[in-house]
Image: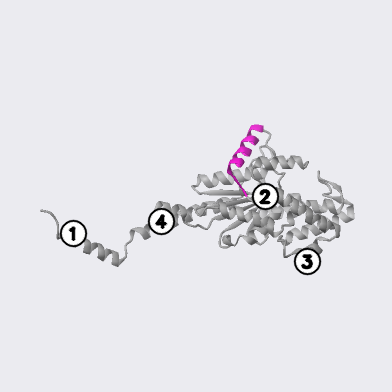
């Protein structure tokens, strides 16, 4: 196989879904570490993001009135990470178009006063969401009706209304066109020789995207998210959270291991889950084995080829100059 063919050969990449909460800047550090770890091992990595740049994401969160979390105290470090991600993101989907269509759909759902379960039964052909998301929605809806508050005990605490409730979960209403646009861009931009595919999106998109990405069916996949941190303690105890975090793969959403990550409280730097680091190392070993096998196949000639070479050599010897 020529070098050119090696570069264009279709590979089964390691697929890493980053199911982020957009206001949590720790995910930026996480993505940076994965990119650098992959590249240091000689692996080709592509990062696909529902935001065109990290800068766009930050500006949007500030505009929505969100308080950015896990921002490094060193402003130069924060700027450096942001620029690094800006340079590496490949945009998938159209946020503006999506928001407009979702807004109209949610207005209709709210007008009819549908519960999450009724909504699921009515729109399941259009919406693809992990079952756990609906369970969480049901818990928060019940809690909101009892207490009269949304996001009780958090900085985002506000009066319970269906409008506020659905606003929390607007990203879960993933009509086929939303992911269709994202998938169209990803499939167009993905290169055949990519070793590691990283897909950065809100956690609510992860399940739906994976259901449609049938070309990754045989790939090893992981989901990295700290979405449990967003669930109020009334819904999930700290002890339960720690149990899930300790086991790392104890929770599933139908894709692969659901992994949490740790954030240094001082530097806000993230440590890649050890399972992912090990998977990257295995990917290197697999690529090396694949290359060695290809090389051996190229150098080892068949019996027919050997006989042809011998015949050609004998023929040439008959015309040797004296």
Range covered by the magenta-colored residues: 75-91
Instruction: Determine the secondary structure under disc 2.
Output: loop
Q: What secondary structure is marked by label 3?
A: helix
Look at mark 1 in the image and give the residue it sits on.
316
Instruction: Tell which of 166 and 38 is nearer to you.
Output: 166
In the picture, residue 123 is in which quadrant?
Answer: bottom right
Q: Earlier in the sequence, mark 2 or mark 1?
A: 2
The residue carrying mark 4 is 292
Asked if the residues shown at circle 3 and circle 4 are in contact, with their CB atoms under 8 angstroms apart, the answer is no
Query: Reading the chain from its start, which is encountered first: label 4 or label 1?
Result: 4
Q: How far across and how far down the image is residue 126, in percent?
A: 72, 62
Return the x and y of residue 27 as percentages of the image width and height. 66, 45
Mark toward the start of the polypeptide (4 vs 2) = 2
Q: How is the image coloured?
A: one colour
| Label 2: few (<14), some (14–19) or many (≥20) C-alpha neighbours in 10 Å | some
Location of the N terminus (image quadrant): bottom left
The disc, 3 or 1, on the residue closer to the chain's N-terminal end is 3
In the figure, residue 142 lies in which quadrant? bottom right
Q: Is residue 254 magenta?
A: no
The x and y percentages for residue 66 are: 76, 42
Other-residue count near label 3 (Cα within 10 Å), few / some / many at <14 / 14–19 / ≥20: few
Tell me the CA gap for discs 2 and 3.
27 Å
**Which mark is on residue 121?**
3
Residue 94's disc is 2
Going from the N terminus, do you reach mark 2 or mark 3 first? 2
Question: In the image, which is nearer the foreground, mark 4 or mark 2?
Answer: 2
Query: How far apart are labels 4 and 2 at the CA level?
Result: 42 Å
């Amino acid at each position: 196989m020529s070098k050119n063919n090696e570069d264009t050969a279709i590979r089964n990449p390691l697929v890493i879904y980053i199911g982020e909460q957009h206001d949590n800047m720790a995910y930026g550090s996480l993505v940076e570490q994965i990119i650098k770890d992959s590249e240091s091992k000689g692996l080709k990595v592509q990062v696909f993001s529902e935001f065109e740049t990290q800068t766009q994401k930050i500006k949007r969160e500030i505009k929505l009135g969100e308080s950015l979390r896990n921002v490094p105290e060193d402003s130069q470090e924060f700027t450096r990470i942001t620029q690094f991600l800006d340079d590496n993101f490949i945009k998938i989907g159209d946020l503006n178009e999506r928001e407009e269509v979702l807004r109209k759909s949610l207005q209709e759902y709210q007008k009819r006063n549908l519960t999450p379960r009724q909504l699921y039964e009515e729109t399941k052909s259009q919406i693809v969401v992990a079952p756990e998301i609906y369970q969480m929605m049901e818990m928060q809806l019940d809690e909101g009706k009892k207490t009269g508050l949304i996001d009780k005990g958090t900085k985002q605490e506000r009066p319970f209304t269906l409008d506020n409730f659905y606003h929390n979960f607007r990203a879960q209403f993933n009509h086929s066109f939303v992911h269709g646009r994202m998938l169209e861009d990803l499939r167009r931009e993905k290169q055949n020789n990519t070793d590691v595919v990283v897909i950065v999106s809100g956690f609510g998109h992860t399940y739906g995207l994976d259901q449609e990405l049938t070309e990754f069916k045989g790939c090893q996949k992981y989901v990295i998210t700290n979405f449990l941190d967003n669930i109020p303690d009334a819904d999930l105890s700290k002890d339960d959270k720690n149990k899930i975090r300790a086991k790392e793969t104890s929770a599933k959403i139908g894709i692969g291991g659901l992994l949490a990550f740790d954030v240094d409280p001082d530097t806000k730097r993230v440590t890649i889950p050890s399972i992912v680091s090990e998977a990257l190392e295995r990917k290197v070993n697999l690529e090396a084995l694949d290359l060695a096998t290809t090389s051996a196949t190229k150098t080892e000639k068949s019996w027919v080829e050997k006989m042809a070479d011998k015949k050609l050599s004998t023929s040439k010897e008959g015309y040797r100059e004296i």
